[in-house]
Image: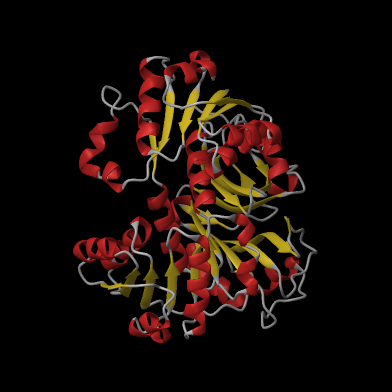
Amino acid sequence: MKVIICGAGQVGWQIARHLSGEKNDVTIVDNNADLVRRATETLDVQGVAGFASYPDVLERAGARDADMIIAATYSDEVNMVTCQVAHSVFGITRKIARLRAQSYMDAIYSDLYRRDHLPIDVVISPEREVAEAALQRLAAPSTFDTESFMGGRAQLLGVALEEDCPVLNTPLRQLTDLFSTLRAIVVGVRREGHLFAPDPNDQLFAGDQIYVFSHVEDVNRTLDIFGKATKKQERIVIIGGGNVGLAVARALEKRTDRIRAKVIEKSRAQAERAADLLERTIVLNGDGMSMELLAEANIDRADAVLVVTDDDKTNILAAVRAKQAGCPMAIALINDPTLVPLMGALDIDAYINPRATTVSSILRHIRHGRVRAIYSIGDAEAEVIEAQVLSTSPIAGRPIRDIEFPEGVLMGALMKGDKVVKPTGDTRVEEGDVIALFCMSGDVPEVERLLQVSIDFF
């Protein structure tokens, strides 16, 4: 597949890394020649320096015979015009655009993206994706990472194990015997910075960060087994009233469990806009790192603080301040993955990586065939792939124990019809079943072969 990626920033670079690693013909376009050079020197991609929306630049990038274009520059308008030029001049069949401004996302303007208007096949909204990720973190407050699969019936949980975890030093195979009715499987372990898929004889130790697949009805019990109390979040303080903070506050207002939220926003104009758009949420204008303002927001009585300004360092410092002021849980928005190792040392409970969230969303829309969802783990170290089993797949009709999965692949959940079951060695995988696989990045090509899908576009 020949793909043109417009924008060599964090998201564009990561998408190029994924697609070039899967032997696609990738060309990356950016008006910053240094970013293009970085991409061509570190990845197996071609590069073109220039404005992505210019027809002559797209021509040089090979648009005449491209299968797909992904417009992920920093400008919404450039992304939209790029898709229009790709369609009108070059006839590129599949066009994906990242759009940040929420006005472009309003449902009443959805006709804008019809083929005879602005021909964009898939619109990705980072703010909307990040707001959804924030809501998932708040729903599972004792996890550092979480994502829904199988239509919300299964949940991937990232859990940091501490000394009080009751199942430390227990081989994973024994957990199945101890909790025979628990529909949960440990699929990944990060130990001393190294991520791996465990085998049944592996034990868990304090300091491990584990990824667990759980049936949605068993999430609380799963967290309890791994030493995590599940406390209902009733009072939330959101620092940052921009698009992300506003989207989270509006979603919380729509909830039936009457969560009480307060928003702190530094910009007076943005604070006034937030106050106009929110009904029950209190909006405070000021610096989220001010101890006086945090006290006014009753941070010591809050169940969680969510820090989602547009500056990573502000988010980290504000989260630390809120914890010092007595808030039991802090979630921070972190764009720079090199800052993530600081989270534990600074006692920040969870983070949201907008880049990983956006990359996962774009990959979900360009994967081929029956792949239904993709979630990127860490710095593209592993992926969780949800896929439907085709009749042509070599795994169809076989029990799981007989399937030759690579060492870095584990099945976390299996859905037959609309029922999610815990996969065991005896479980037979049938055509039409939906499976969720944890795969180390190097094993993705073999997973493609087993699923009989090429990780391409349709």
Q: Residue 13: percent from the left, percent from the top?
A: 58, 39
- Give x and y (percent) for residue 172: 73, 66
- For this view, does 275 lie left or right of residue 307? left
Please state if 1 lies on the left or on the right of 269 as rendered: right
Q: Where on the picture, by quarter, is residue 389? A: top right
Q: Position of residue 259 (x, y in %)?
A: 32, 74
In the shown orientation, is residue 184 left or right of residue 114?
Answer: right
Relative to the observer, which residue lies in front, 282 or 385? Answer: 282
The spot of residue 372 in percent (x, y) is 50, 41
* One can see residue 173 in this view: yes
Q: Nearer the viewer, residue 207 or 147?
A: 207
In the image, residue 177 sits, relative to residue 357, either above or below, namely below
Image height of 4 relative to 347, above or below: above
Camera-nearest residue between 21 and 400? 21
Q: Quadrant of the N terminus?
A: top right
Residue 218 at least partly seen: no
Residue in the picture at 43% in, 51% down: 151
